[in-house]
Image (cartoon, rainbow, N blue to C red):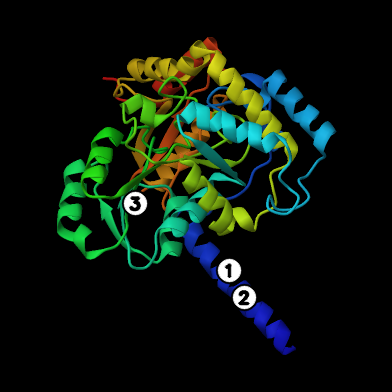
Amino acid sequence: MTRNDDTTSSLDAFAQNKLAQLEARNQRRRLVESSRAGAMSMHVDGGPELISFTDNDYLGLSTHPDVIAAARDAATEFGAGAGASRLVTGNHPLYSKLEQTIARIKGTEDAVVYGSGYLANVGIIPTIIGQNDLIIADELIHTSIHGGVQLSKATVRFCRHNDVAHVRDILETERANFGRALIVVDGVYSMDGDIAPLKELGELAKAFDAWLMNDDAHALGTIGDGRGSLHATGAHGLVPLQMGTLSKAAGAYGGYLAASRAVCDLMRTRSRSFIYTTGLPPAAVGAALKALELTEADAELVARPTKLAQHFANELGLAKPVTPIVPIVIGSETDALKASSDLADLGFKVIAFRPPTVPEGTSRLRFCFSASHRDHDVERLIAACKKLGLGNMS
């Protein structure tokens, strides 16, 4: 056996050992081939039709014929790929239209589009915060925000979830010891569906010369008349950094930062995950443009997912949701996986979320409602959950 073989063998042994540990905790993940269609219909690994209540396609726009046509037209006119990073030759003409549209929706001077929401979070934070600075982050922030926080090398303090008083305590105790300070939260928390108290946090940030950043991945197109969490909470003028994605309610792909013109120009100049990433395919940008146009034009479309979520929750005796997300916490990984499998047997795709995505002991089913869900499918889901004893029905 050569030295190279020894190295390969040790690598495989390491990987297999880690996988075995994850398997023992029911935390190993596997890809399944999913074929999606309209009305949240899908087939998994060539199996029978399932109705997905686990998708982030809150408005059903990823399969909307007008969005698909816009993607096709953009690819025909500008090509299948961008060809290079945006600062080289990949900044095709659709980008400026998309950034202007995002800025208008979010109520900012400008916006800058990234390759994904993950790339946005790992790029924005290290560009404005460094090792002599302070970050206060909600304990339930998305993993991609953790990535940006770690890259910044700043001092990090985690606050209790949505606890404004705890944020105040940290600022009063530690703000004077650092140069810049950033408070970072999710606008809508994807595993619980609750909304950050942006107005109260924004007022705190202003009082202590800190900057507030929210991740609106699950808020654009779903709350605040489709404009997101700032507009839903009345935090106008208090959130200078509004980050989000184009891959959920917008039905396409990409991430963005909506901010002042100066901040967006800084990102284009210094944010590594913007500079060193090939531009989005024109089809993705064209699709996002059309999706945002439909979102702005149809208030009923935007309101429907949350209305469906509230009906579902009411029928199962759950707390009234304020977004299209309804979690049912099961507890153990094994029980959550079984509940997901049982729902699949009844015709529904609902993913079991397990650690490290959620805290230990809180594995859950997360139900996401879409404007494209048919009423009779929602009623069938309610009946299925009652049959399986899911919810708080007496």
Task: Say which residue label 1 marks.
Answer: 15
Q: Secondary structure at mark 1?
A: helix
Residue drawn 19% across the image and 54% down it: 170
Residue drawn 42% across the image and 15% down it: 307
Disc number for residue 11: 2
- Under mark 1, the amino acid is Ala
Q: Secondary structure at mark 3?
A: loop
Disc number for residue 360: 3
Q: For the N terminus, which image quadrant?
A: bottom right
| Quarter where residue 289 is shown | top right
Camera sees residue 344: no
The residues bearing labels 1 and 3 have C-alpha atoms spaced at a distance of: 23 Å
Relative vertical location of residue 185 with respect to residue 188 in this rendering, above or below:
below
- Residue 148: x and y in percent read 45, 57
- Under mark 2, the amino acid is Leu
Check whether the beta carbons of the residues at disc 1 and disc 2 lie within 8 A of each other. yes
- Under mark 3, the amino acid is Glu
